[in-house]
Image (tube, grey):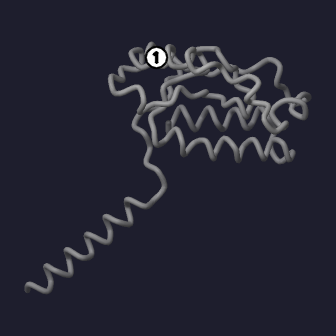
Amino acid sequence: MRNVFVAAAVVLLVAALFVQHRAPAKSGVVASATLTPGAVNPDVTQATIGSTICVRGWTRTVRPPVDYTNALKLKQMRAYGEAGDPSRYQEDHLISLELGGAPTDPRNLWPEPYPRASAVDQIENDLNAKVCSGDLSLVEAQRQESVLKHTDG
């Protein structure tokens, strides 16, 4: 009987380790369609992607300063009802800069919790690559990103 309990404990331990190494969990906080509906940069269109989002380093030219995003993060954390440590959140663009999101428009920024904020960066890069290769339109990529952040965080 003791061996059955030991075997069951081992199975539970292995299962717990497996669960910990899966894809990052959802954050529990999703972007609010009311507070953060999203906004796009009017300078980025399907016709201009070759001189904007598809140019390596372009996002650095439009990224807002940290003092702006940190102040906005504190205000938006209160609006979202989040009272945790601000360093646990990234003031993230709903429509990423890589997909032509408005850099400083508060309607396009929200306090996205880590680790989900970091995990979503790869999705944004993948969508950007699809747009720049012609496999996906800019508008469709923006739609997909908006749906993701409004439903999964």
- Residue at 58% over, 14% down: 106
Residue type pointed to by label 1: Gln
Quadrant containing the N terminus in the rendered view: bottom left
Secondary structure beneath label 1: helix
Q: Residue at x 68, y 20 (%)?
A: 103
Give coordinates of residue 122: x percent, y percent: 63, 47
Q: Position of residue 142 (x, y in %)?
A: 70, 32
Where's residue 82, x and y in %?
36, 23
Residue placed farthest to the left in the image? Answer: 1
Residue 50 screen position, x and y as percent: 90, 34
- Residue at 27% x, 75% y: name it: 11
The foreground one among 62 and 144 is: 62
The picture quadrant where one finds residue 69 is top right
Residue 148 appears left or right of 12:
right
Name the side, left or right, on which 48 lies relative to 66. Answer: right
Residue that appears at 37% across and 61% down: 19
